Amino acid sequence: MSRLNRFRFLMFAVIVALTATPALALINPSLQPNYLYARFTTVMSLCVKSVAADGRSATLSVDKVFKGSGESKEILLSVSDESRAALLANWKSGDPVVALVGSGQGRRANPNELIFYFGTRSNWQKGKVTGDGAWNWEPGDLGPDSGAGFGLWGAWNGHVQRLAEMMDDLAHDRYYFPTRAMVVFDQPRDLATFQPDEVRGLAAHDLDGGGLTDLLIASRVGVKALKQNDDGSFSDVTDAWGLKD
């Protein structure tokens, strides 16, 4: 599909969405961490098995390997500073974790690089593979400004289990997350009729403060205002709102 055709399709999808019944959300696949999944050699989900009494380490059991080889069934995650130890102290048995290990290719390959994610409103964490089945949790984290793939808000709800499902989708070449559609589209409806090339633009906004999205269409022959009603239908209010001229 050409870039122009994709643009036309997206514009069509937006207009259809505006005329649809209320929906939950629209998932933008460009915000998914495809870049991170492709960059790392091993991608896996784990769960917390136990936390050491001194709060300096946790044992993680490997739940599922989405990409690469995960020979170790258990990982000992150690911390090296007080702030990481304070976070780890809140972990409980069964808590999920998603980890990506070993990045890059050629000269830039770093088999010991580690990033992982463990919960809502928490950024990606940095780490290092220190041995067979041994990881170290390093100070600092990776927020949305750290580069492609780290700004995940808007693509999913921040829950680590949803991230694991996203990794599973990528592993099976399912590009969209979630696989269950989150938007219900109505059948296309004719809301207004114009001659070819007359329409110059369309704005969607709650024009009357009623809590529903209304439409304002600009054309070579004037504007047309369409108010959305409670049942999802639209009424032409161009004259009533004094916009005829």
Image (cartoon, rainbow, N blue to C red):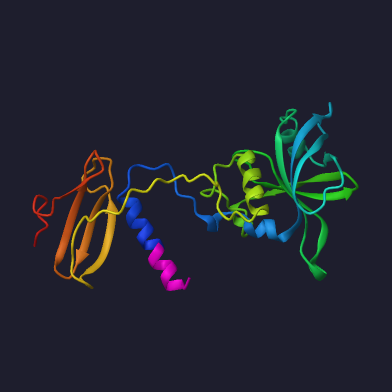
The image quadrant where one finds the C terminus is bottom left
Say whether residue 209 is left or right of residue 126: left
**Of residues 39 and 209, the one drawn nearer to the viewer in this rendering:** 39
Give the percent coordinates (x, y) of residue 58. 81, 34
Q: Residue furthest front?
A: 187
Residue 8 in magenta? yes
Give the percent coordinates (x, y) of residue 98. 71, 44
Give the percent coordinates (x, y) of residue 1. 48, 70
**Of residues 5 and 79, the one drawn nearer to the viewer in this rendering:** 5
Q: Residue at the spot x=69%, y=60% of the render?
A: 38
Residue 119 in magenta? no
**Of residues 224 and 128, the one drawn nearer to the viewer in this rendering:** 224
> Would you say the magenta stretch is mainly helix, strand or loop?
helix
Q: Residue furthest top?
A: 53
Task: Tell me which segment is drawn in magenta.
Answer: 1-9
Q: Quadrant of residue 93?
A: top right
The total of numbered circles placed on residues is 0
**Of residues 86 and 30, the one drawn nearer to the viewer in this rendering:** 30
Q: Residue at the spot x=17%, y=58% of the render?
A: 224
Say whether residue 75 is left or right of residue 8: right
Please, is residue 118 above or below residue 197 in the view?
above
Q: Residue at the spot x=81%, y=64% of the render?
A: 109
Give the percent coordinates (x, y) of residue 142. 67, 51
Say whether residue 199 is left or right of residue 182: left
Q: Quadrant of residue 147?
A: bottom right
